[in-house]
Structures are given as C-alpha cells and as structure tokens.
Image (cartoon, coloured by chain):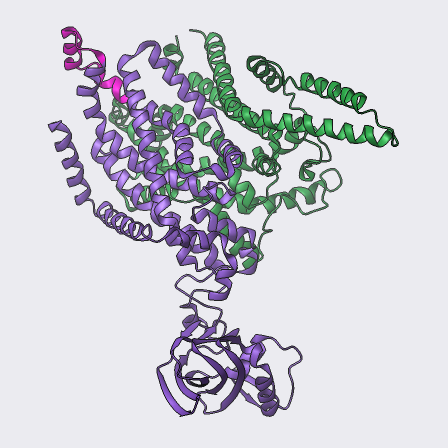
Amino acid sequence: MGYGRFLVKTAVIYVTVLFAAMSILYAFYYPIVQKLYWDFVNYSASQLRTQLIRQAHGTVNVTYVNQLVDRYRESLISAYGLNKPVMVKYAVQMWNLLTLHFGVTPPGVEYPNYGQTNNIAAIIAVALPRTIILFTTGTVIVIAVGILLGVLAARYQGSAYDKSIPIIAVIHSSLPTWWIGFLLIAGLAYGMHWFPPNGMVAPGLTFSKEPLRYVASLLDHMTLPLLAFFIVNVGGFAYIVRSLTLATTKEDFVLTAKARGLPERKIVYGHVLKTASPSIVTQVMIALASSLGGGMTTEIVFVWPGMGLLTYEAVMESDVSTVMATTYVLTLVLVIALWLNELIKGFLDPRIRASAE
Amino acid sequence: MAEVETGLRVYLKFILKDRAALASLIVIAFLVGVAAYVSTWPSSVAFNYLNRLQYWESLYPADAAPSWMVYFEPAAYTPTLYLSPSSVILNYSAGNVYIYKLTYSFSWPSLKAPTDVSFSFSGNATISQILIVWRKPSGSEVNMSVTVGSTTSNFDLVGVQKALLSYIYERTGTMPTFVTSDVLAKALFNSLSSSGIGPAERGTYTVTVYLVTQGPEKLSQAEIRILGNAYGYMGTDYYGRPILLGILLGLPNALEMGLLASLLAVLIGVLVGGYSGYLGGKADSFINWFSMVVLALPALPFLVALGLWLRSSLSLWVEVLLITFLSWPFYAIIARSSAQSIRTSAFVEADRLLGIPSYRTFFTHFMPRLTPFTVAYTVLGIPGVILLVQSLAFIGIAPPNLVTWGYLLDQAYANNAALNGWWWWILFPGLMIVVVAMPFVIVGFAIERAAFGGR
C-alpha cells in the first residue's frame, strides 16, 4: 500500500475518533449547557420586562408588555435552538465546534490574562501557544535526556547505574508534578529568590517593544515549571526506552551484527535504536499529547496562563462555552498528535503500513 | 480453577523473595491497618476538620511548625504545652470560702517566649477569684489575679495584662509600646532586667494557682495551655488544624478510591478487551477504536468540568465511576493482545470444534490465564488513581465530606503557605501521596515481573 493511501485511511479513522470523543463530551455537558441557556433566556426576558415597565412612565399596559416579552423570549429560544429536537442541537453544536465557532463568553465573564476580548476562539488562540511552548520544550528535554539515559542503561545492563533506572521509574510513578512544583516554588522561588514564583513574563513587558528582555523573562519564568516537569517525567521515560532497547537487543539481527564484529556503538545507535524507534515515537507522542491536557495542575500551580489555567478559570466562572471549547481544542490537539504518531510510525516501519490494509 | 491457585502461589513466592516488594507489602499492610483504625472514628471528626474552622483556632496554635523543630532551632521555635496540675490540695477553708492550691510544673526548651498562655478552669462551685504565682527557673516570681464570679473561667494573658505590664515596668523601667499577647508572654518567660528583655529562660517553671471558690469544688477542668509556634508531629495549618489529623483522615478514602477505581477499570478492561480479543474481527477493531476515543479525551479538564458541575452531589462512588470510565480502555488494549495470543492455542480450537459456546470457552480458558494480568494491573493502577484523585482534590474537585491530601495542599496553596514559609503544610501531605503510592508501584512491578517473565 502506498504511503498516500495509508495517510488517507488513518486520517478517516482519526476524524471518526475526534467525532466520537466530542459526542461523549457533549453527552456529559448537555444538561448543564441546556440549563445555562434557559437561565440566560429567562434572565434576558426579565431584563426586557423591567426596561419596558420603566419606559412606560406609570401607565403600564400589562398585556402588551407580556406579549412583547413573550415574543422576545420565543425569538431567543429559537435563536439558541432550545425548542429543537436533541439531534438537531447536537448537529448544530458539532458543526460549530468543527468550524471553530465557539461563540463569546457569557456577559460579565472576562479573562484579562488572555487579551481584552470576549471571543472564545481569540482567547484560545492566545492560550494554546503558551501551553504548547511550555510543554513541548519540557517534553523535548525529557526525550533527549531520557533516550540518552535509557540507551546507556541498556548498554551497561546490570551495572549499578542500570539498576537505579527502575528505582527512578518507581518514584516517577508516585510523584505528582504539581506537588514538586509547589515545593520548588517554596524552596527556590520564595526561599532562595532564584526564580520568579509564578506567571509567564514580568508584568508590563511586551514582545513588540522589548523582544530580548521579553524572551529572557519568559525563560526565567519557564525554568521552574520545566524543572518540575523534568524531575517527574525523565525517570519513567528512561525506563521505557531501556525496556524497548533491551527487547530489541535480544533480536537475531543484533546477534548477527555482533557476530560480524561491528563496533558496540554502531550496533546500539545504528541497529537497536533504529528498530526500537517506532515504539519510542509512540511513547513520545502519547507523552506529549497527554502532557498538554495533564499539565492543567502544573499550569495552575505556576499560574501559567495557558489552556489548563483557562479551563480552570472558565470552570470557576461556570462558563460552559469556554470549557467546551478548551476541551475540544485539547482533544483536537491530542487526536492530531495520535495521527501524526501513526504517520511517523508508518513512515519508519513499513510493516505497520502493510497491516493497515 | 486449580491453575489459578498455583498461579497466585507462584506470585506470592516471587514477592516474598523480592526484598523491596516484601517491605512494600508490610508498608501496605500497615497503611491499611491505620486506615481501618481511622475509619472507625465518627464522621464528625472529618466534618469538623472541613467546616468548623473556629473550633480549631481555640484548640491549637495556628501555623505551628512540627514540635521537633524546637530541638533544631530553639531560638526560633517554641513548643505548645497542655498542662494539667500535678497536685490539687485544699489549702484553706472557712465557712463557705474554700481555697484550693493547684501546682503545675513544666520544662521549657526554647530560647523564645510562646505566643500566648491561656488558662481555663471549671467545676461545680462558683469560682470567685484566681491567684497565679508564676515562678521562673531563675527564681523570679510573677503574681497575677483574676476576679471571676462564675463556675467557669477562661482567660489568656490579655486578661491579666495589668499585672504583667506592671511587672515589666518594675523590672525594665519601660513600658512596651504595643501590648499584644506575645509581649505579655515575655514577662512570664524572658529574663527581664534594667538593660532590657533577654532570651527566654530555659529550665523548669513552677506555676501555683490558688482557686478561691464558694463551697467545695469538684474541678472538671484545670488546664494551662502554652501556645507556641510548634505543635504536633507535623505542625498545624493556618486555622490551627493539625496536619497529622488531616493526613490520617485522608488515608482511608485514598486507599478506598484507589482500589475501587483500579479494580473496576481492570475488570471491565479485561472482560471487554479479553473477550473482543478472543472474538477477533469487527468487535475487536471496534474496541480498539473506542479505546482510542477515550484515550483522546483530555482526562483532567474533562473530570474538572464534570466535578464542578456535580459539585455537592459528587460522591466517592461517582468519582470512582468517572475515573473507571476514563481508564478501562487502557487495560482493554493490553488484555486484547494477551487474549489474541491465547486464541491460537490448540485447546481453544478443540473447544470450537466441539461446539462449546464462545462465552464458556472464554471463562474456562481465557479468564484464568488473564488473572495474573488482572492482579498486576490492579495493583499498578492504584497509585495512578490515587495521584489523579489527589490532583482533582487539589483543584477543588472532591466529594464534599471527604478530607483528602489534595484538599490540604489546596488549602496550603490558597493560604500562601509557600510565600509564608510554612513548609510542613506543603511537605507532609504531598509526601504522604508518595509514601502511599510507592509501595503499590513496587509490588505491581514485582507481580508484573513474575507474571510476564522479567519484562
């Protein structure tokens, strides 16, 4: 099968995955979305009634006012599609999400950390790059160091260094990142005053005016979250790389390479790592994708104004539209990451391309 | 089922040989024992911890460091002591007037005075007057008196400030500009001289209290509380709640949720994944696809939104079921591949030829072989669930009647514990998460090694 057909076929599968995931989200959010819309309609209708009575200056035609208010209410209900059947509401919602029409935040709800706008798509356009910049940097560091540590452990199998990797992996599985972040803030930010405790850049700095100072401040603010992310994730990743590499070391072609008298270095990097790379890529992509959604607590602790903090603020404001939008965008990013993973794997390993037939 | 028993025995042997796993099992047994003990406490303890903040303020000092810090830094930390009288003697009685002499003594290890001293006396007879003679290690004495007129009397140093201020003036020749309980406590603890206020005197203090009562007194309470800035094994929080109590209260629900959610998810995953792997074909690819769908859901934002929507109706079981819903497909994927390898065995083929229904083949041949898998992943899943539950609680999503470590850390965060340097409030609850999660990870790794041959 050609790579083009493989690409299209996996793309179709991942679109259905995205659709199904959104449907599950919608099924869970449906009751609260409906309640919120009804609340808003009733609130607007009562607002209009008060306004009309105030404008009438004493002589109130109650029947007329009620008629007007009812008509307004009806128009709002049909505008929000509240009288439509569930399936139609579902279809409209899905279409809006797919076309990135997230609407605006409810009246009174503002997110000053993400620019002076109430357009949810614009808010997310500010928040998403911030999350990506933090967690992609973190993941790249973890991958680079993790692969190095894991391969070294596999090369010197049985040494004290190799034995310490599982211990680090055990610790990795039992550490909450946000707690490490909390400790780092208490120790290095407030205790030693080495790093700023929270935020993304020093207040008042803009990239357009002082780009160099902006970037320096950004790096300064990124250090602690990155450190927390690194401490928690590097052990587990090194352990996975070690296991995958060791599993490949037992294969026949490695033995053949050894028999041919190839240097150890060449075997490890040329044969073993190359064969293990599709599995490592899978781990990397899943780690990267889940770090975006799972970084919520880290963002909250470090007050990093990305998607996680935005979701948290929106949830606190009961702003369901924004919550729906952020979960959708995170899901979209995850699905794209999973798809890319499939593509890279298919590119690296022809067997996978063949099995998709 | 004989095969299963030998299987489990093999794992047990394997774990008993592995020293780290054995130690972890002992730790788990200890934690379960503590959890069982804590769950016998009345639910009012947890309720008070979460809701009655004033109750703790009067009981324990706020923001207190762990008491053992006194021995590391005697110049910075002062212990909290709850004194009861070493002797109660009827000193004098004439007519309706009785005078009781209560003797207290304690030793003070710190170089600093406490923040406050409070006295509380109550009994069946009316107390008309209380006289206190406070004797420092150097022999210097402070006299205080309070007029009462009821059966109970509670007062702290502000209630006897006149006597203390005149004592300070008499000793140092100056009056303090601000009168707070810390300043007044210096009169009782520090060595005062004309050159100023020195450090607190270390050594044995003797306090003699004369209670003047109308009629014979049966004391129900006669306590002197010295409120320092250190208390308990793990200190207290901003409201005076002991951290240790919160940690103990968080243990049963952490273990319960971890076990329930992990077990449910693995069971569902093994049943669905194993069966679909056994059937193969369309059902199999559907399960694979559905696992991908759930994998694509951003778990934490999703749970946060649902949890806040449910708010007070969020119970332990609802949270467990939500976590189960998000995690079972992971186990289904792994169980599926295990089942696929069993599928090609000769005995499965034989069953099919004999016309035995597929579900029966599944339960007689597949489930017993998937048991080690179930055990290993249940144990390995527990720390993951505990971490997730605590992360959610840290964000503020937790059943409203449960004390969790995430809640303690959330409170620490909300009250700027990091900024104020209340490290004990941050360190111990988080450490507890690690301490509880780690033995499960170690045992899980050991079972995994036993079950799947040293992967």
Measuring from the top left, give residue B157's x and y in whole percent: 54, 78
Left or right of A112 on screen, residue B225: left
Q: Quadrant of residue B205?
A: bottom left
Left or right of B450 on screen, residue A7: right
Image: A231 above or below A264: below
Q: According to the colouring, which chain is purple?
A: B
Q: Please tell me whether residue A314 belongs to the stretch shown in magenta.
A: no
Measuring from the top left, give residue A354's x and y in whole percent: 38, 10
Image: A131 above or below B227: above
Q: According to the colouring, which chain is green?
A: A
The N terminus of chain A: image quadrant: top left
Count of picture labels? 0
Magenta-colored span: B337-358
Residue drawn 44% across the image and 62% down it: B235
Q: Main secondary structure of the magenta part?
A: helix
Q: Nearer the viewer, residue B383 or A147?
A: B383
Q: Please tell me whether residue B349 belongs to the stretch shown in magenta.
A: yes
Image: B171 above or below B228: below
Measuring from the top left, give residue A101's x and y in whole percent: 65, 21
Q: Nearer the viewer, residue B180 or B394?
A: B180
The C terminus of chain A: image quadrant: top left
Measuring from the top left, give residue B73's x and y in whole percent: 46, 72
Q: Quadrant of residue B362?
A: top left
Q: Nearer the viewer, residue A93 or A237?
A: A93
Residue drawn 30% across the image and 39% down it: A156
The answer to whether residue A41 is seen in the rendering is: yes
Residue drawn 15% across the image and 29% down it: B4
Residue drawn 23% across the image and 50% down it: B26
